[in-house]
C-alpha cells in the first residue's frame, strides 16, 4: 500500500471539502473527524455482523447491489462489497485525522494477532484514547496515531482484505467523494 499516495489523495479531497465549506478553514476539525470515524467504524462492524450473537445471520455482508448510472447516465445495477466500502470510509477519516495532526510520514505497527471483534474494540479504544489525550493535553503523539493506524490495518487483514483490495477500493471511493463535492452532496 502506497501510504504517501493515499495521504496525498486525502489531502486533495480535504482541501476540496474546505473550499466547498469555508467555515471549516482555520478551525480545529479534529472533533468532527473523530466522531465521523467512530460512526463509520460502527457501520463497518454492522456490515461485519460478527458481534450479532442474537442473529442467525452473522456472516459478513460482502455482496450488495444498488441502483446506479453508467457513464452515459443510463440506469444500471451496481454490485459492491458493503463491508469493504465501510472499511474504506473509515480509512478516509483515519488519513484525514493524520493530516489534521501532521502525521503523514508514519510507520505501520505490527499488532499482535487477534480476532476481528477484538480489533474493532481496539480501534474504538485507540480512537477514544487519541481524542481524550488531545482534549486533555492539546496534542497527540505520533505513536498513538501509528498504533491506531496499525490496529486498523490489522482489522482489515482480519476481515480478509488484501492491501491491493483496500487501495483499489480507496481510489474508487475517493473518486465518488470528489463527485459528491461537485454535485453538492
Image: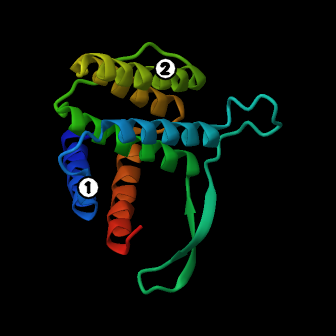
Number of residues whose C-alpha sits closer than 10 Å to that of mark 1, classed few (under 14), some (14–19) or many (20 or more): few
Could you say where residue 128 lies in the image, as x and y percent from the top left? 43, 23
Could you say where residue 4 lies in the image, as x and y percent from the top left? 18, 41
Could you say where residue 83 lies in the image, as x and y percent from the top left? 56, 45
Residue furthest toward the top? 112
Nearer to me, 128 or 171:
128
Tally of numbered discs: 2
Would you say residue 29 is visible in this rendering?
yes
* Picture disc at residue 122: 2
Nearer to me, 6 or 166:
6
Would you say residue 163 is visible in this rendering?
no
| Residue that appears at 21% across and 49% down | 11
Label 1: which residue? 23
Q: Looking at the rendering, in which quadrant would you find the N terminus?
A: top left
In this picture, is 52 found above or below 133? below
- Please identify, in this view, whether the residue under mark 2 or under mark 1 is nearer the observer: 1
Question: For residue 141, what is the image quadrant?
Answer: top left
Could you say where residue 182 lies in the image, as x and y percent from the top left? 32, 72
* Picture disc at residue 134: none
In this picture, is 179 found above or below 7? below
Q: Looking at the rendering, in which quadrant would you find the C terminus?
A: bottom left
Q: Is residue 94 left or right of residue 85?
A: left
| Residue that appears at 38% across and 20% down | 132
Q: Is residue 53 left or right of residue 134?
A: right
Determine contact: label 2, label 1, CB under 8 Å. Answer: no
| Residue that appears at 41% across and 81% down | 71
Question: For residue 64, what is the image quadrant?
Answer: bottom right
| Coloring applied to the structure | rainbow
Q: Is residue 64 left or right of residue 32?
A: right
C-alpha separation, residue under disc 2 versus residue under disc 1: 33 Å
Nearer to me, 95 or 16:
16
Amino acid at each position: 500500500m502506497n501510504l504517501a499516495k493515499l495521504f496525498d489523495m486525502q489531502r486533495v479531497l480535504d482541501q476540496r471539502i474546505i473550499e466547498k465549506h469555508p467555515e471549516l478553514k482555520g478551525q480545529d476539525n479534529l472533533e468532527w473527524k473523530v466522531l465521523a470515524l467512530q460512526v463509520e467504524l460502527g457501520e463497518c462492524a454492522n456490515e461485519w455482523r460478527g458481534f450479532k450473537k442474537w442473529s442467525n445471520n452473522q456472516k459478513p455482508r460482502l455482496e450488495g447491489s444498488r441502483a446506479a448510472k453508467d457513464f452515459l447516465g443510463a440506469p444500471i445495477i451496481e454490485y459492491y462489497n458493503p463491508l469493504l466500502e465501510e472499511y474504506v470510509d473509515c480509512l478516509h477519516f483515519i488519513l484525514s485525522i493524520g493530516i489534521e495532526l501532521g502525521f503523514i510520514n508514519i510507520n505501520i505497527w505490527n499488532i499482535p494477532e487477534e480476532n476481528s471483534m477484538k480489533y474493532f474494540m481496539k480501534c474504538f479504544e485507540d480512537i477514544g484514547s487519541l481524542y481524550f489525550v488531545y482534549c486533555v493535553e492539546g496534542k497527540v503523539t505520533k505513536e498513538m496515531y501509528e498504533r491506531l493506524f496499525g490496529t486498523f490495518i490489522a482489522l482489515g487483514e482480519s476481515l480478509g482484505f488484501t492491501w491491493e483490495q483496500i487501495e483499489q477500493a480507496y481510489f474508487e471511493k475517493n473518486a465518488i467523494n470528489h463527485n459528491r463535492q461537485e454535485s453538492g452532496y
